[in-house]
Amino acid sequence: MKQRYAIGVDYGTETGRVLLVDVATGEEVATHVTPYKHGVLTEALPNGKRLETDWAIQHPKDYLEVLYQSVPAVIRMAEIDPKDVIGIGIDFTSSTILPLDKTGNPLCFHPNWRDHPHSWVKLWKHHAAQGEADDITRLAEERKELFLTRYGGKISSEWMFSKILQIAREAPDVFEATDIFIEACDWITYRLTNNLIRSSNTCGYKALWNKREGYPDSSFFKALDERFENILETKMRGPVLSIGGKAGELTEEMAHRLKLVPGTAVAVGMIDAHAGVPACGAVHSGQFVMTMGTSTCHMLISDKEKAIEGICGIVEDGIIPGNFSYETGQVAVGDSFAWYVNQAVPSYVKQQADEAGMSIHQFLEEKASVYKPGQSGLVALDWWNGNRSVLVDANLSGIVAGLTLTTKPEEIYRALLESTAFGTRKIIENFTEAGVEVNEIFACGGLPQKNKLLMQIYADVTNREIKIPDSDQTVALGAAIYAATAAGAKNGGYDTIVEAAENMAKVKEETFVPIPQNVQIYDELYKFYLELHDYFGRVTSIMYRLKKLRSLSMEFESKN
Amino acid sequence: MKQRYAIGVDYGTETGRVLLVDVATGEEVATHVTPYKHGVLTEALPNGKRLETDWAIQHPKDYLEVLYQSVPAVIRMAEIDPKDVIGIGIDFTSSTILPLDKTGNPLCFHPNWRDHPHSWVKLWKHHAAQGEADDITRLAEERKELFLTRYGGKISSEWMFSKILQIAREAPDVFEATDIFIEACDWITYRLTNNLIRSSNTCGYKALWNKREGYPDSSFFKALDERFENILETKMRGPVLSIGGKAGELTEEMAHRLKLVPGTAVAVGMIDAHAGVPACGAVHSGQFVMTMGTSTCHMLISDKEKAIEGICGIVEDGIIPGNFSYETGQVAVGDSFAWYVNQAVPSYVKQQADEAGMSIHQFLEEKASVYKPGQSGLVALDWWNGNRSVLVDANLSGIVAGLTLTTKPEEIYRALLESTAFGTRKIIENFTEAGVEVNEIFACGGLPQKNKLLMQIYADVTNREIKIPDSDQTVALGAAIYAATAAGAKNGGYDTIVEAAENMAKVKEETFVPIPQNVQIYDELYKFYLELHDYFGRVTSIMYRLKKLRSLSMEFESKN
């Protein structure tokens, strides 16, 4: 049989990565990365105009450059016939949005708008719409909007309508001039296919859309802002297509620029973290994927829809068509280990690590590996940047308990690793206690590759085997899997994500298996974690008061 | 008027210090230190015989050498007439005990006993009598012995009868051969005067003695060990004299060796920490002295006797005759700051401190000084080595709460300083709430001289002025004050400790005065401390369970 290929385009925060994959086996044939020329703009526009604090914008041309540079590059590197490429899939950071004109071009491309900050792309981590997010939450609470329960009761400043509302309030002229507001991944498929469609994945997680209920009612939007009354039919128009499907086919013009063949299938776009799910092979109800890096994002595929405490989002057809997908998160994971290494590891440890030719992380991992669970007498709460799931509370903060004069750095390090594992166990139990099953766990992202002790601790704490995908670029691989599905079996791809994942996704042979003796002790230690979790998370308001006192003390200061 | 002098001899853990003081003014005329040649023996006897773990012994000859070397030295250095020395006072670590033969010589001086570890001096920090201490506590509880309430309900392994019981159990022959068991300070006054007396201070704090009740009943001793039935009339004989009084006068022989005049007054001996109290000028009811070093010992003079939770000892005539003195403690103070600096200060801070030519403590003190109370958002529990007062619980451990990704080392350092201040406030409030007044606070020991920020925090947290004695050797000065009192007014000294202290003790002009704005914020922060204190100290048993799990995990380990 002739070899067929799919292309995954992974738009990250700083670079775009293009991966060429063998559709039959998932083999990664070639990869090419194009950094964004303008990067993340937080200080000023490309023309030098200053931005306010908490802004983060990007240049849409950088996204197109990824296509123009990296797609031809992988074809060239692999020395294949472009005819054998059957599909392209896109994943993107989200919610990253931009305003378009009537021709589908970014408003910021126009000479008369390009000096206006609000005409540019708002990157996911643009956090200047917090006031707007709070207003949306408040209004939804007042109106007892059911959609709020699908998002853990809180609308994020990162989401689509928070950002659009900020534009409407701060730049009525930009709002007025905008023909369409669109997620960046949907803009890319729009450019590739000339079809204006939206992804069920981005709309479900970032734009309050639901497969059965659709978007919130127009009366809700009107109450939010008079100008929003008909927004769904105007600036938010465009059909929502299910992920796993086809957004359209490559246009003549784009095929020419990308050195591909016109008519090539283009998949409905995805949020980057979510694209990694099928790349782990997780496509069935009960499969749970953790993307572990500075923070952890957990995604659970389930055939059940339940309103559960502390979920960041429940979306039907969210990741795997025909299923619900739940997203939860731990805000500081790698971040809190990095804090520890930078702010609290003594110089003698640094010196020993240097002498051993190891990073401090490696060195502490090795030292901490010698300890048995419970041996340090420490327990920590992993809330260095608040708690996203299941408490949904940014005011919470971290704790280390059990410190003594003999406590060693590697013991604290281990306690921090353990605390994030306990946080994950709490999230899993939150699902299972509500009757939503978690049957199989996969861990992807940077951390699982780097820290074996961490993964063994997760296995021991959760008492579950942990599987690691056999790819360094799961997200781009995931985008390619969606591409192969968009192409369909008749074109040499697959008719379902399940089939595509079964053939293209692989996990490593080496998995992390719970050690019964450790499981037993961690069962005890987890009880202590839970007790602290509930005391500080639900009973006392000490952490709120500490934070309040902190602001008070600084006001005091500025008055004096 | 002719100048008169008193000598204070301060027996510490590693060295003996002799201080010559002007009786009229307290001026420190000359000082000389003799290190103990054998130091602290924890591994082996001087002859090489191995010691078991937790042992700590000393060589009594080293104590005599301090007298023989340093007393003549200060006379020589000051170029004074020995006739003008009116008294000698002794303070000593405690409970440091030794077995004597019928002539008053240490058993370990005998060739037939010197190979036996139990014939040597047991230093205060000999901790091998824990089992014996627990048995004494248990027996006292069973018999509902009232004396237990004067010691916070717990007998320490460091105390006199715990150590004697260990000898009786492990070395019946040594026990049998002993004519007298004696505190080291009382042995020194015995050697100097040839009078066998005991100090109300050491007997009150370390040997279960009470001015009105005396020692525990002989039935108690019999129940402890048959051989102890008549111990009070035999191996523990010797009258208990009140501190502030005279133990006797210098013998002909000793005067010759010390280059002093026979008949010179020798004061009743004192525990070292307690000798510092009058040297601060604290001699009246309501005066509270903190000796702050690796740990803190608090001593309160009071005319009231109340059974209060968490007291290490209440002794009538304990420190100032005619008053009760209360002792409380915080186990890890300087120790926990040192732990932090050694185990948790990152290398970049060490490097900056090095570049600034400062110690890490100084550097962190300077950086932490810039912060306002409450600004760090942190609160800690100061239990790195358990809690002595008011919870009397060695199983408790330390906590830092409020940690975030932006927490800086100087903030944690400041939180640790604050936590010990909160611990002291809790101890003070424990007195005042029981109706025992605390009117004036003095801080002596090494820490107050070294860390101004620490003392300002104590002033702000307690909302009280803190006074610092104007001497680097308060304990030796205190011993000299007791010496001047033992001599009496008719010999150029004083008839009471109060008069002696009024003339000989001085505090620095610079005191630490509460800053109202800081007091206000610390009042809030102290509430958070109290909440954690009561939760971890009285409500949850998490810290016990962590400690238990720790042992369990290590047993597990050793079995595998």
Image (spheres, coloured by chain):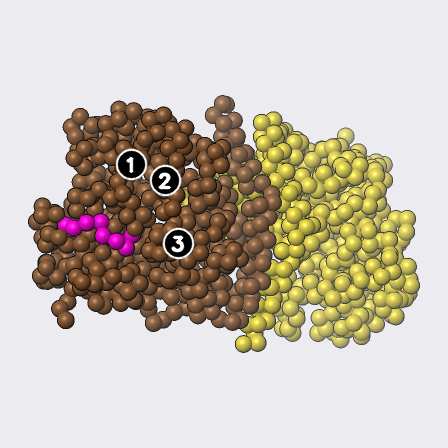
Chain colours: A yellow, B brown
Closest to the observer, A107 or B186:
B186
| Relative horizontal placement of residue B78, taking residue B292 as reference (left or right) | left
Identify which amino acid the numbered label 1 is placed on.
Met
Q: CA distance from mark 3 to mark 2?
A: 17 Å
Identify which amino acid the numbered label 2 is placed on.
Tyr
- Label 1 Cα crowd, 10 Å radius (few <14 / some 14-19 / many 20+): some
Closest to the observer, A298 or A392:
A392
Q: Which residue is mark 3?
A: B324
A159 magenta-colored:
no
Q: Which residue is mark 2?
A: B215
Vertical position of residue B142 compared to residue A76: above or below: above
Q: In the rendered image, which quarter is residue A463 located in?
A: top right
- How many numbered markers are drawn? 3
Q: CA distance from mark 1 to mark 3?
A: 24 Å
| Relative horizontal placement of residue A200, taking residue B315 as reference (left or right) | right
Q: Which residues are magenta?
A: B243-250
- Label 2 Cα crowd, 10 Å radius (few <14 / some 14-19 / many 20+): some
Q: Which residue is mark 1?
A: B236
Labels 2 and 1 within one chain: yes
Identify which amino acid the numbered label 3 is placed on.
Phe
Q: CA distance from mark 2 to mark 1?
A: 10 Å
Name the residue located 41 percent from the left edge and 49 percent from the top edge: B314
Rendering coords of residue B148 (x, y %): 45, 41
B248 magenta-colored:
yes
**Sequence order check: which comes first, mark 2 or mark 1?**
2
| Relative horizontal placement of residue B149, taking residue A183 as reference (left or right) | left
- Secondary structure at numbered mark 3: strand
